[in-house]
Image (spheres, rainbow, N blue to C red):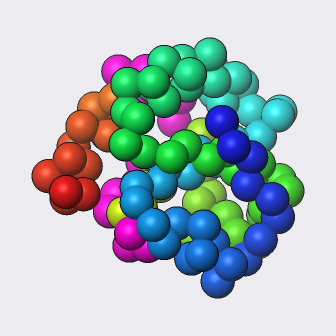
Amino acid sequence: MEQLPKMSAADLKDVVKDGKTMLFFSATWCPDCAFIKPAMPDIEAEYPDFKFIAVDRDENIDLAVELNVFGIPSFIAYANGDEIGRLVNKDRKTKAEVEEFINSLATNAD
């Protein structure tokens, strides 16, 4: 998974402008992030139409604040630069919950 460098929300617009992008906000100290990380390669493989990008919440704290990401692990989906959905809260997420979220986007993203 590609790692997002430190950037602002304005800079992020360029990253998410083409196709479908899924931002995965996490931090090294977060136990719930560590819980979902082993499932991420499988999730990425199941949804090849999305480009998955890891966002270190601590490195990108200003971006997280600008995007109202106050809990991790969290996911924000974009299609051609527009936000199409978010799974943003402080709860632990299972592989099935993340898949359900991404599947719910299909009607919005095509």
Q: In which quarter of the image is residue 60?
A: bottom right
The picture places residue 50, in percent across and down from the top left corner, at 42, 45
Residue farthest to the left, as pictured: 107
Q: Can residue 90 be seen in this view?
A: no
Left or right of residue 109: residue 15: right
Residue 91 located within the stretch drawn in magenta: yes
Residue 58 at what x, y percent from top left?
83, 53
| Quadrant position of residue 97 | top left
The residue lying at 81 percent from left, 59 percent from top is 5
What stretch of residues is rendered in magenta? 80-98
In the rendered image, the vertical position of residue 102 relative to residue 81, given as above or below: above
Image location (x, y in percent) of residue 35: 62, 19
Determine the residue positioned at 34% across, 29% down. 99
* Position of residue 57 in the picture relative to residue 68 (left or right): right
Task: Please give the name of the residue rendered at 62% of the width and 58% of the height, measured from the top-left corner.
Answer: 70
Quadrant for the N terminus, please. Answer: top right
Q: How many labels does the image show?
A: 0
Q: Can residue 98 be seen in this view?
A: yes
Q: Residue at x 77, y 71 (%)?
A: 7
Looking at the rendering, in which quadrant would you find the C terminus?
A: bottom left
**Is 85 in the magenta?**
yes
User: How far from the left and from the top, in percent, is residue 37?
Assistant: 63, 24
Given the current orientation, which residue lies at the most extreme bottom position? 10
Placement of 97 over or under 26, stated as above or below: above
